[in-house]
């Protein structure tokens, strides 16, 4: 438990797209955290019942937790997780921000552990790692390998030694957002954010977290295409020379075209 003198103001930014089955429970879990002051929900043009559920849940929570500041906003069109997070960051007013997916794969009860290195003055950014301990559901081998490979590639460019670059749980001091501009709209946010905090030479910590992964039957959305896109984003945001980046993209395109041609 945190000492009262060390309880910070924490903003939780929640990007949402078609999470009607989980968003109600997730919002209650987040609101039950003793260190949460602000909840910001950004809906990315959901096509299911997420929006009415969010509105009703927020109204009910505020009847019981009037001290909370809960904001809800909707993107004008579907733009992706990165765009939703940027919108949420602009609305955040607390000292510390944490990203929370709406799918119940990550446990809000772990906020207090994650924030401790920041409160102690040791960290600017804290990553919650699914791969260094903690309870986790056993799922897809190739997803695990894909995450490890993307993290390895990111580390090679950024010279960090993270174990889980793609983790949802990224907690950070709000003021670090003044040091760089985020641009990625979709799942490129993870490698972009990692590359830019590395370039800014911020103090980064990793802590083990539990992970309750979903299957595709449960509604998991990320696919191999997102992994391929992540590779491009890792290169894009870590290379300092635009010419090198363009040359690499051109080489990749030539390779892909040659492979397709050989199959024809």
Image (spheres, rainbow, N blue to C red):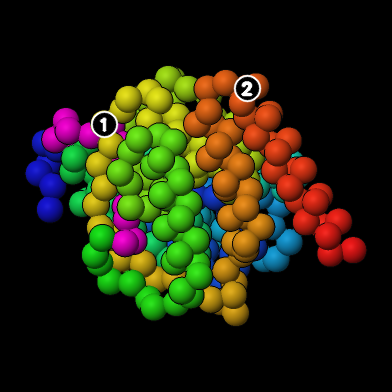
Q: Is residue 77 left or right of residue 208?
A: right
What residue sits 26% from the left and 47% below the top?
206
Looking at the rendering, in which quadrant would you find the C terminus?
Answer: bottom right
Give the number of the mark in front: 2 or 1. 2
- Whole-percent x, y for residue 44 in the image: 66, 50
| Depicted 128 relative to depicted 26: above or below | above
Q: CA distance from mark 2 to mark 1?
A: 27 Å
Q: Is residue 128 magenta?
A: yes
Any mark on residue 203, and which?
Answer: 1
Q: Is residue 177 visible in the rendered structure shown here?
A: yes
| Depicted 262 relative to depicted 115: above or below | below
**At numbered mark 2, what does the secondary structure look like: helix, strand or loop?**
helix
**Residue farthest right in this picture:** 264
**Quadrant hosting residue 118:** top left
- Whole-percent x, y for residue 201 in the image: 32, 25
Q: Residues within 10 Å of mark 2 (few under 14, many from 20)?
A: few
| Depicted 256 relative to depicted 204: above or below | below
Q: Please tell me which of labels 2 and 1 falls first in the chain.
A: 1
What residue sits 24% from the left and 65% below the top?
133
**Quadrant hosting residue 252:** top right
The residue segment tinted magenta is 119-131
In depth, the one of 55 and 96 nearer the eye is 96
- Whole-percent x, y for residue 117 in the image: 19, 40
Any mark on residue 1, and which?
Answer: none
Residue occupied by mark 2: 242
What residue sits 50% from the left and 61% below the top?
146
């Amino acid at each position: 438990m945190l000492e009262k003198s060390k309880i910070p103001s924490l903003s939780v930014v929640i990007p949402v797209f078609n999470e009607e089955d989980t968003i109600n429970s997730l919002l209650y879990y987040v609101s039950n955290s003793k260190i949460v002051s602000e909840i910001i929900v950004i809906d990315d043009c959901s096509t299911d019942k997420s929006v009415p559920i969010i509105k009703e849940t927020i109204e009910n929570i505020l009847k019981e937790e009037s001290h909370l500041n809960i904001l809800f906003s909707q993107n004008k069109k579907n733009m992706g997780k990165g765009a939703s997070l940027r919108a949420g960051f602009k609305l955040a007013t607390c000292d510390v921000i944490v990203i929370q997916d709406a799918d119940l794969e990550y446990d809000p009860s772990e906020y207090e552990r994650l924030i401790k290195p920041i409160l102690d003055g040791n960290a600017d950014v804290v990553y919650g790692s699914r791969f260094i301990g903690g309870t986790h559901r056993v799922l897809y081998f190739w997803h695990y390998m894909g995450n490890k490979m993307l993290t390895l590639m990111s580390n090679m460019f950024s010279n960090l030694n993270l174990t889980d670059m793609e983790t949802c749980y990224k907690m950070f001091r709000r003021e670090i957002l003044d040091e760089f501009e985020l641009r990625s709209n979709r799942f490129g946010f993870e490698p972009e954010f990692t590359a830019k905090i590395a370039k800014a030479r911020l103090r980064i910590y990793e802590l083990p977290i539990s992970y309750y992964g979903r299957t595709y039957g449960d509604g998991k959305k990320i696919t191999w295409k997102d992994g391929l896109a992540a590779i491009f984003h890792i290169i894009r945001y870590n290379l300092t020379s635009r010419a090198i980046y363009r040359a690499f993209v051109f080489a990749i395109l030539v390779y892909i075209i040659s492979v397709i041609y050989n199959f024809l």
